[in-house]
Amino acid sequence: MNQIRYLLFLLPLAFCGAAAQTKTDTLAGPVTLEQCIRYALKNQPGVQQSLLDEEITERDIRASLAGWLPQVSGDANLSHYLKRPTTLFNGQPVQIQPSYSSLFGVEANQSIFSTGLVLASKASRFTREQSRQNTELTRIATVTDVSKAYYNILTSQEQLRILDEDILRLEKQLKDSYAQYQAGIADKTDYQRATITLNGARAQKKTTAESLNYKYAYLKQLIGLSPQTPIQLAVRSTGMEQEMLLDTLQALNYDNRVEIRQLRTRQQLLALNTSYYRYGFLPEVSAFVNYNLSYQNNRFQDLYSTKYPNSQAGLTLSIPIFTGTRRLQNLRRAELQERRMELDLVDTRNAVNTEYQTAIASYRSNLNEWKTYQANVALARDVYNTIKLQYNEGIKTFLEVTIAESDLRTAEISYLNALYSVLSSKLDVQKASGTLPVNP
C-alpha cells in the first residue's frame, strides 16, 4: 500500500518533468536566433547523420580492436568412405581407415603480436577525432545557414513594416490630393500620381509578403522543423544592429579552422599507415589451444559409442619472407601520400587566408555602406518632412512630395539590405577565422 502511494506521488512529478522536456525540445512562441540554432543542432537531419556517423565510427574501431581478444570457434564434421583407402603394410594391402568418422572440436586463438592490430590501436584515437571534426564541420555550416536565413526573414519583416508606413502616408496623400482636386485647388495629375505610387507600394508589399513564405519554409528545413509547424521570430532590426559589430584587427589563427585540423589528423593517420608498411616484415605471433572429440567406427549405428578425445596447445609464428616487392611498393606509395598531404595542407592554408581576407573586405565594405544608408535615412526623412510641410503651405508641388517619399522608402529599404549584408558578412568572417560559436 505504501509503495502504491509512493508511485502516485511520483507520477505528477514525472509528468511535469516530461512536459518540461517537451517544452525544451519544441519552439513555442516567438523564438530567438539562439533558440533556432539550439533546435537545429538537435533536430537537423544533417547534424543527426553526423552524430550517427560518430557512432558508426566507434563501432568500426571496436570491431578492428576485437582482434586483441581471444577468438573462439567450433567445428563439427561427419564423413563416410564410399570406398575405404588401402595402405601397404609389410607388402600386404591393408584398409586401416574406418568407414565412418566424426569430429567435434573447439579452438581458441589469442593474438600476441600483429602489425595490423598495432596500427588499429594507434589509429583509433585519430579516427575518433576525425569523426568529431566532421560533426563540427556540419555544425558550423548549420549555424551559418540558420543565422543567415533568420536574419533574412527579419529583414523582410522590417521591409513589410516600412512599406506599411509608406502605404499609410501614400493613402493620406491620395486622400488629400483628391480633396484638393475636388476643391479646384490642384489638377487631377496630383492624385493620379498618388494613385500610381500607392499601387506600386502595395505591389511591392505583396511581393515581399509572398517571399516570406519560402523564406520561412527554408528556415524550417534548416532547423529540422516540420513544414506544418508554425514559427514566429522574436527580434526586430534593433536587435540585429546590436549583433553586427566585429573586431577586424584580430590575427588569423589557422588552427581555429576545422579544415586545417582535419588535414593534420589525416597526416597522423597517413604516418601510421607508412609505419605499418615500414615494419611489415615483422612476424605475427599468436597462441592457440584446442580440444577435439573424435569418433570412428565401421558401423554407423555404433559410430558415437566410443569417443577418442585429444587436445593441443601451441604458438604460431608467421613471417613474410618474400611478397614480390609488394610491401616496398606500398611503403613508397604511403610516403608519397604523406608528401601529397603536406601540399594539401599548404594549399588549404592559402585558401583559408584568401577566404578570410575576402570576408574581411566584404564586411568592411558592407559596414561602410550601412553607415552611409543610415545617414541617408535620416536625411531623406528630414527632406520628406520639410517638403511635405512646404507642399501643405503651397510652396512645393506634389511631384516633389512624391519624389521625396520615394527617396525615403528607397533609403529605408537600402538600409535594411545593407544591415543584412553586414550580418551575413560577419558570419562569413567568423566562419573563415574559425571563431563562429556553435554552442549557443
Image: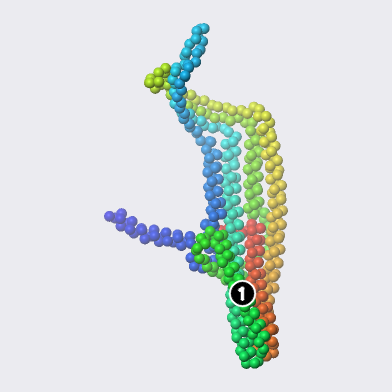
For image coordinates 60% across by 84% down, the residue present is: 172
Residue 19 in which image quadrant: bottom left
- Above/below status of 201 relative to 148: below
The answer to whether residue 397 shows anywhere in this view is: yes
- Quadrant holding the C terminus: bottom right
Q: Residue at x 59, y 36 (%)?
A: 116
Front residue of this view, candidates 336 and 26: 26
Identify the amino acid type marked 1.
Answer: Ala
Residue at 40% x, 18% y is: 299
Residue 30 against residue 199 in the figure, above or below: above
Q: Residues within 10 Å of mark 1 (few under 14, many from 20)?
A: few
State which quadrant residue 257 falls in. bottom right
Residue sitting at the far top? 91
Residue visible at 58% across and 48% down in the picture: 131
Residue beneath label 1, please? 203
Q: Residue furthest left?
A: 1
320 to 166, vertically: above or below:
above
- Identify the image quadrant of the N terminus: bottom left
Instruction: Check disc 1 and report its element: helix, strand or loop.
Output: helix
Q: Position of residue 428 (x, y in %)?
A: 65, 61
Q: Position of residue 170 (x, y in %)?
A: 62, 81
Q: Is residue 382 visible?
A: no
Position of 425 compared to 75: left or right? right
Between 352 and 87, the one lying in front of the other is 87
| Residue 370 position within the rendered picture, expressed as x and y whole percent measured from the top left | 67, 71
Question: In front here: 109 or 402?
Answer: 402
Percent of width and height locating residue 180? 63, 90
